[in-house]
Image: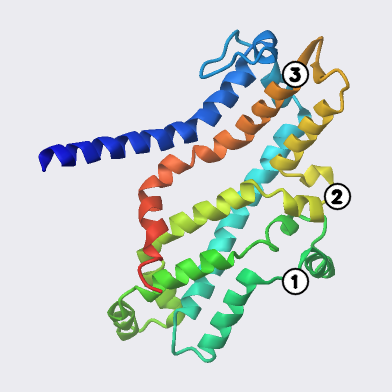
């Protein structure tokens, strides 16, 4: 029994190590290529560690004047959009969690319907245009403010809260908004942190909305600017882009742009990890 248990644990550890390796290796490879000398990149001799330190790819990305303005824009979009999305999602989910609400089932079915069917790109663009949001700061926030999937997860979480807690709030004289703000939200830290992380990552990587709604390059988010840097390098017939008197190969430049755009949002995960494991599963307890 002990032997079979130890063998199973070894197999589990090997399996998990394989998953970790499959997850981490692409990042290590991209970092290695972006930091390696051109001769090793051309010969495809890069594995886990960089060979011959070369910072020209990062120099090309970080010295581009468009980068820092796009970083500022993306941070502003995430800083404003994430709390707004959380507030609207939590309020809508709390309302849908109240089965005594008038037309509760009808509203729930309408919300779930949007998970499978939507108006499409052109109708959505026409709606955004009619609201005067095209080429504005809010065009990157309002059209994608609510995710139906996140709304359903948070609704399921609210359904699992004890009714006695809310009833005690009513005894103390709180109305529905007071109960939501003073009791429900403080008890939903794990769920809010998890959903907030999903929203923040979505806003950080939002590329589609910028292509549809933005015309002013001063409002471009980070992903669009990094794409333009890569596209500009691909248009050079010699297979690279010039930085001063030096030339940067396309492959290191691509990987450098990926690292520059990915690392900041990855740094958020360790601070939310303790909430993430609990919050990601907490909405699946009840259907």
- SS at badge 2: loop
**In the image, 31: left or right of 282?**
right
Q: Nearer the viewer, mark 3 or mark 2?
A: 3
Which numbered disc flags the more N-terminal residue, 3 or 1? 1
Which numbered disc flags the more N-terminal residue, 1 or 2? 1
Could you tell me residue 276's position as x and y percent?
41, 51
Above or below, 261 relative to 238 = below
Check disc 2 and report the residue beneath it. Answer: 215
Picture residue at 42% right of the left edge, 37% below the top = 19
Could you tell me residue 30's position as x and y percent?
59, 26
- SS at badge 3: strand
Are there few (<14), some (14-19), or many (20+) residues within 10 Å of tag 1? Answer: few
Are there few (<14), some (14-19), or many (20+) residues within 10 Å of tag 3? Answer: many
**In the image, 263: left or right of 65?**
left
Measure the C-alpha gap from mark 3 to mark 1.
Answer: 42 Å
Above or below, 27 relative to 177 = above
Picture residue at 70% right of the left edge, 40% below the top = 222
Considering depth in this image, is 192 or 218 the residue closer to the camera? Answer: 192
Check disc 3 and report the residue beneath it. Answer: 249
């Amino acid at each position: 029994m002990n032997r079979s248990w130890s063998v199973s644990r070894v197999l589990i550890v090997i399996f998990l190590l394989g998953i970790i390796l499959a997850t981490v290796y692409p990042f290590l490879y991209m970092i290695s290529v972006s930091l390696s000398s051109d001769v090793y990149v051309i010969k495809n001799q890069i594995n886990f560690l960089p060979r011959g330190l070369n910072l020209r790819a990062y120099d090309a990305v970080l010295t581009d004047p468009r980068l820092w303005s796009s970083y500022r824009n993306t941070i502003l979009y995430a800083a404003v959009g994430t709390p707004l999305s959380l507030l609207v999602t939590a309020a809508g989910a709390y309302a849908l969690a109240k089965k005594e609400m008038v037309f509760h089932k009808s509203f729930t079915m309408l919300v779930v319907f949007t998970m499978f069917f939507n108006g499409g790109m052109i109708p959505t663009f026409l709606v955004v245009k009619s609201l005067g949001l095209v080429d504005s700061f809010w065009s990157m926030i309002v059209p994608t403010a609510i995710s139906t999937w996140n709304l359903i997860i948070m609704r399921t979480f609210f359904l699992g809260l004890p009714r006695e807690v809310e009833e005690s709030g009513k005894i103390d004289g709180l109305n529905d908004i007071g109960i939501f703000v003073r009791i429900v939200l403080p008890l939903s830290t794990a769920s809010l942190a998890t959903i907030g992380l999903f929203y923040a990552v979505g806003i950080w990587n939002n590329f589609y909305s910028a292509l549809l709604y933005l015309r002013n390059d001063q409002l471009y988010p980070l992903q669009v600017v990094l794409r333009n840097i890569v596209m500009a390098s691909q248009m050079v017939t010699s297979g690279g882009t010039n930085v001063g008197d030096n030339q940067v190969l396309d492959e290191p430049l691509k990987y450098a742009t990926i690292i520059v755009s990915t690392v900041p949002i990855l740094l958020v995960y360790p601070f939310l990890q303790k909430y993430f494991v609990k919050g990601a599963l907490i909405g699946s307890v009840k259907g």
